[in-house]
Image (cartoon, rainbow, N blue to C red):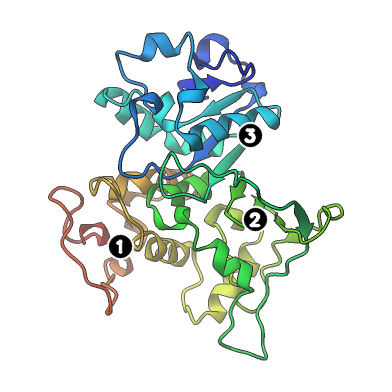
C-alpha cells in the first residue's frame, strides 16, 4: 500500500489516512492519473503544516475540480480509498517526495483501478463533462485498413491518443503500470485492462446494450492501438510478429523499450529534472522482471545498441538541464 491514502467513503468526512494504521490491503484503492498544469493550489496540496489537519478532514468542495471528481468516481465505484499524488505526498518535504517517487511503480501497479482524467490540461479542469449526452457501449474494432495503406487505425483511436495525458511525461508510466485504467475523455469513456478494451461512446439516442468486448488480438497488421509493455506478457510471440511487420529487425524486449522511449521523449515536463524520474518506476518493474542492469535510460545487456539513439531529424532540441542525465543518454537532450 502507499504510505497515505484518501478515505472517500463518507462524503462528509473525506480525510487522509496512514495506510499501515487503518487500511486492510484487501480493500484496495484507486489511483488518479491527471495533469497538474502550471501549479497546484494550496487547497489541493498536502504540506508539512497541513498534514495533521488533513488526517482529520479534507474539504472536498475546496479541492481542484479534477481531484474532486476523482473522489466522486472512486466512491461511486464502491472503492473506499484513493491515491492522489498532490494529497498523499507531502509536497514541501523533499525526503518524503523522494521516498514516494521511489515507490511509484508499486502505487500504480497495485491499484485496483487508475482513473485517467484525459480531458483537461490542468488540475481544475475536471473530467466529468457536464451536459454530455448519454453514453452507450459500442464495439469499435481496432484494425488496419488494407484498402487504404495510409489509414493505420480507426478514427476514435487517433482522437483518444491526442488527449492531454498522452502529452505529459509522468502519465506514460502511470498508464503502463496500472492493471486497469478507466480513461475519461471529452467524448468517451474507455476501460483498459491487460486483456481487453471496452469503450463507451456518445449516443445519439438511448443508452445501448451490454458492452461488447474488444480483445487484444494483436492483429497481424499494425492495429494502431498504443499497446502497453506489460500487456504483452502472455502475448509476446504475437506482439513480436507485429513488431516485425513494422520493419523492426530485432525481436526482443529491448526493441519494445526503444519504442517506449521514442514515445516518452516526445512528452512534456514541468520540471526538466523529472525526465528520468518519471520513467524510473517502469524501468524498475522491467529490471525486476528481466534482471537487467539499468543506467540512465539504457540497459547494460544491450548497451552497444542502446547508445545508438539519435535526435529526430525534424525536431528542434536543446541540451537538457545540467545533471538530468549523462551525455551518452537519450535523456540528455
In this image, 244 relative to 278: left or right? right
Q: Which residue is mark 2?
A: 188
Name which of mark 3 and mark 2 comes first in the sequence: 3
In space, the residues marked 3 and 2 are separated at their CA atoms by 15 Å
In this image, 131 relative to 49: left or right? right
In the image as oriented, which residue stretches furthest toward the left?
Answer: 322
In the image as oriented, which residue stretches furthest toward the front?
Answer: 131
In the image as oriented, which residue stretches furthest toward the bottom?
Answer: 147
Q: Which residue is mark 3?
A: 73
CB under 8 Å between discs 1 and 2: no
Q: From what the image shows, is residue 111 above or below residue 311?
A: above
Query: What kind of element bears circle 2?
Result: strand
Q: Which residue is mark 1?
A: 303
Residue 140: x and y in percent read 73, 66
In the image as oriented, which residue stretches furthest toward the right?
Answer: 209
Q: From what the image shows, is residue 314 above or below residue 29?
A: below
Query: What kind of element bears circle 1?
Result: helix
Amino acid at each position: 500500500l502507499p504510505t497515505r491514502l484518501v478515505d472517500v467513503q463518507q462524503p462528509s468526512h473525506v480525510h487522509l489516512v496512514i495506510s499501515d494504521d487503518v487500511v486492510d490491503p484487501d480493500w484496495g484503492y484507486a489511483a488518479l492519473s491527471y495533469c497538474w498544469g502550471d501549479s497546484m493550489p494550496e487547497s489541493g496540496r498536502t504540506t508539512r503544516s497541513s498534514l495533521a489537519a488533513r488526517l482529520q478532514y479534507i474539504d472536498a468542495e475546496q479541492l481542484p475540480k479534477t481531484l474532486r471528481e476523482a473522489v466522486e468516481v472512486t466512491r461511486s465505484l464502491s472503492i473506499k480509498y484513493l491515491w492522489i499524488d498532490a494529497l498523499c505526498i507531502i509536497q514541501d518535504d523533499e525526503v518524503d517526495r523522494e521516498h514516494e517517487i521511489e515507490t511509484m511503480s508499486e502505487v500504480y501497479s497495485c491499484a485496483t483501478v487508475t482513473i485517467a482524467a484525459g480531458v483537461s490540461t490542468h488540475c481544475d479542469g475536471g473530467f466529468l463533462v457536464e451536459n454530455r449526452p448519454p453514453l452507450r457501449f459500442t464495439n469499435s474494432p481496432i484494425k488496419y485498413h488494407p484498402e487504404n495503406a495510409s489509414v493505420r487505425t480507426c478514427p476514435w483511436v487517433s482522437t483518444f491518443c491526442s488527449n492531454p495525458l498522452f502529452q505529459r511525461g509522468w502519465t506514460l508510466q502511470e498508464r503502463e503500470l496500472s492493471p486497469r485504467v478507466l480513461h475519461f475523455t471529452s467524448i468517451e469513456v474507455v476501460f483498459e485492462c491487460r486483456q481487453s478494451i471496452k469503450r463507451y461512446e456518445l449516443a445519439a439516442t438511448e443508452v445501448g446494450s451490454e458492452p461488447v468486448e474488444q480483445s487484444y488480438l494483436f492483429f497481424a497488421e499494425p492495429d494502431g492501438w498504443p499497446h502497453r509493455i506489460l500487456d504483452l506478457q502472455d502475448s509476446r510471440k504475437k506482439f513480436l510478429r507485429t513488431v516485425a511487420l513494422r520493419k523492426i529487425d530485432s525481436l526482443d524486449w529491448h526493441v519494445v523499450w526503444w519504442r517506449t522511449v521514442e514515445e516518452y521523449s516526445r512528452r512534456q515536463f514541468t520540471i526538466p529534472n523529472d525526465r528520468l524520474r518519471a520513467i524510473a518506476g517502469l524501468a524498475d518493474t522491467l529490471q525486476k522482471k528481466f534482471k537487467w542492469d539499468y543506467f540512465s535510460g539504457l540497459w547494460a545487456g544491450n548497451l552497444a545498441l542502446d547508445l545508438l539513439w539519435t535526435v529526430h531529424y525534424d525536431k528542434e532540441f536543446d541540451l537538457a538541464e545540467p545533471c538530468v542525465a549523462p551525455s551518452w543518454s537519450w535523456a540528455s537532450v
